[in-house]
Amino acid sequence: MESVIYMPQLAPHEFLGIFIVATLVLVFGVGYAALITLSKMGFVPKKWQPVGYIFWILQAYSLYDLSVRIQSNPFTAKVLAVAMIIYLFAPHLYFYLIEESERRYEPAEDGQPIK
């Protein structure tokens, strides 16, 4: 028995709106990652981090709007929501792991090995 994937047809007049919203998902995602990364690295002041979170909120809303416009099924909408939550914490986890590995593997100042 063949499995059939049901995907509703998109109206041609909706294409531009879908394209713009999909582009906004990418733009806001890059803005979030850039501001969080640059503030964690010290290239921009820490006061810019809330602006990065605003970009994440805008990205999450744009992704929700995109899923509504393309008529995603409920399972796909849940997967996208989980992906957005993971994307919120991914940069923090990345920098936490880097800081811990530097602390663990950097040679000690007094020449003693780190335990």
Image (cartoon, helix red, strand yellow):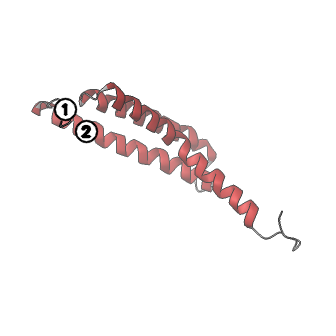
The percent position of residue 100, horizontal first and vertical second, equals 71, 56
Identity of the residue furthest to the front in this view: 1
What residue do we see at 56% from left, 41% from top? 89
The percent position of residue 113, horizontal first and vertical second, equals 84, 70
What residue do we see at 21% from left, 35% from top? 5
**Residue 18 appears left or right of 103:** left
Q: Is residue 101 above or below residue 65?
A: below
Three-letter amino acid code of the residue under disc 1: Met
Decide which of tag 2 and tag 1 comes sooner along the chain: 1
**Residue 60 appears left or right of 94:** left
Which mark identifies residue 68? none
Which mark identifies residue 20? 2
The percent position of residue 24, horizontal first and vertical second, equals 33, 40
Which structural element holds mark 2? Answer: helix
Which mark identifies residue 7? 1
Which structural element holds mark 1? Answer: loop
Q: Quadrant of the C terminus?
A: bottom right
Mark 1, residues whose alpha carbon is within 10 Å: few (<14), some, or many (≥20)?
few
Q: How many marks?
A: 2
Q: Quadrant of the N terminus?
A: top left
Residue 67 falls in image quadrant = top left
Identity of the residue furthest to the left in this view: 12
Three-letter amino acid code of the residue under disc 2: Ile
